[in-house]
Image: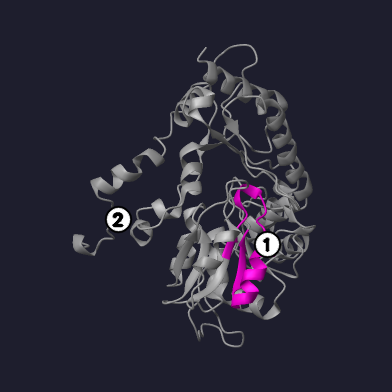
Amino acid sequence: MIEPRRLLRPATLTDAEMRRIQHLLPDQDPVLCDPPQEPGSPRHALHVCEPILDGNELLYVTECVRSNWVSSGGPFVTKFEEQFAALVGCEYGIACSSGTAALHLALAAQGLGPGDEVIIPTFTMIATANAVSYTGARPIVVDAHEDDWNIDVTQIEAKVTPRTKCIVIVHTYGQPARMDVVHEIAQRHQLTVIEDSAEAHGAEYRGRAVGSLGDAATFSFYGNKIVTTGEGGMVTTNDATFAQLVRRLRDHAFSSDRHFWHEYLGFNYRMTNLQAALGLAQTERLSELVERRRTLRAQYDASLKNVPGISVPAEMPHTKSVSWMYTILVDEAAFGCSRDDLRRSLARRGIETRTLFIPIHLQPIYFHQFLSERFPIAERLCRLGLYLPSGPTMKEPEVEYVVQSIRHAATGQ
């Protein structure tokens, strides 16, 4: 029997600490109901994202099963790596088990460890900070920019210390960050730059594909991503030595000339042939999947532009975003109800939503590290933001149903 004292103890906040941040945190997720039986309603609930798998996905997965190549040794892994890397402008791709694993590999391959610091945005999914912590290094967070919600590049340099080794840039919700400014800072301080491109498949900055703009980049292929393998990730880079090391670390750091011989610590972060088969089929239609997201954004933009109290992130100069999720902010005073009231109203009408990220500095496991700092933009996004159904299966009448339901919640009728 495991002794209770040896169990992992969760990080907790005091009652006073919780009271201090309670107004920033979202309510519990509302129960999703079936749409009402009325004219114009969809026949099923609208989820935030459902993948579309009607290309070569079934054909390729069936080939895996018939050939018995279901492990990571199958040929689809290499095909997927090569084709995806080429589409994002890189020579090398290393497929792995998740986007988090990809980011951990990219950081571990730099030799990061205790005493090192990595600059990241505070407005991001917890995986970005956790991947840094896995190496023993310390995440140092920066506030978001109020226009595009990406890391505020004007605040990065103030966070650089002699211990800083790397900057991780997240292209938030598919909006490319200002990479030219990031590179200027990195060059001045001799820092590496990693792109966390989990949400930005197919996005571009100054005519170049996201994923080719840093020393390396990482992607997620989780079920709601633009390209999906169910679970999965990839590291992309143009650095042959770095790619070789990442590839070796991914597979227990097996020796190239003697099996079961390990000269340094590796990980089991391999992708299966089955997953790669899905990924290859999805990659073949990346441009189509990206265009579906952009069309969806245009439809939402046109229908919501005159709704008081609703705002969206700006499309910044020199960027071509992919709108991974259609995100909005809800100003209660102008809109007529709060963000959480809107979520409950939409859920009753069969529309699923998600709140935006709870920033890293508010998370119990990191809270006390940043206790003396303030990040007002990230906190505002957390308090007011949500995203709407945004998957490639969404049709124009369903978008209009969502918009009409938002208007319904605003008027209370």
Residue 348 vertical position relative to residue 142 in the rendered view, above or below? above
Q: Which residues are magenta?
A: 168-196
Residue that mark 2 sits on: 10
Q: Secondary structure at mark 1?
A: helix
Q: Secondary structure at mark 2?
A: loop
Q: Amino acid at mark 1?
A: Met
Q: Nearer the viewer, residue 22 or 47?
A: 22
Q: Which one is nearer the viewer's eye here, 405 or 241?
A: 405
Mark 2 and mark 1 lie on one chain; the one further toward the N terminus is 2
The quarter of the picture where residue 340 lies is top left
In the rendered image, the quadrant that contains the N terminus is bottom left
Q: Residue at x 72, y 52 (%)?
A: 203
Q: Position of residue 90 (x, y in %)?
A: 74, 67
Residue 366 vertical position relative to residue 166 in the rendered view, above or below: above
Residue with the mark numbered 1: 179
Q: Amino acid at mark 2?
A: Pro
Q: In terms of depth relative to the viewer, which is nearer, 263 or 167?
A: 167
Q: Is residue 204 above or below residue 37?
A: below
Would you place residue 300 above or below residue 245 in this image?
Answer: above
Q: Residue at x 76, y 53 (%)?
A: 318
Q: Position of residue 186 (x, y in %)?
A: 62, 72
Q: How many marks?
A: 2
Residue at position x 77%, y 58% in the image: 206
Mark 2 → mark 1, Cα distance in angstroms: 36 Å
Side of 73 relative to 329 (left or right): right
Percent across and percent down for residue 322 are 70, 46
**In the displayed structure image, the side of residue 67 where residue 142 appears, left or right:** left
Q: Is residue 286 visible?
A: yes
User: Which label lies toward us, 2 or 1?
Assistant: 1
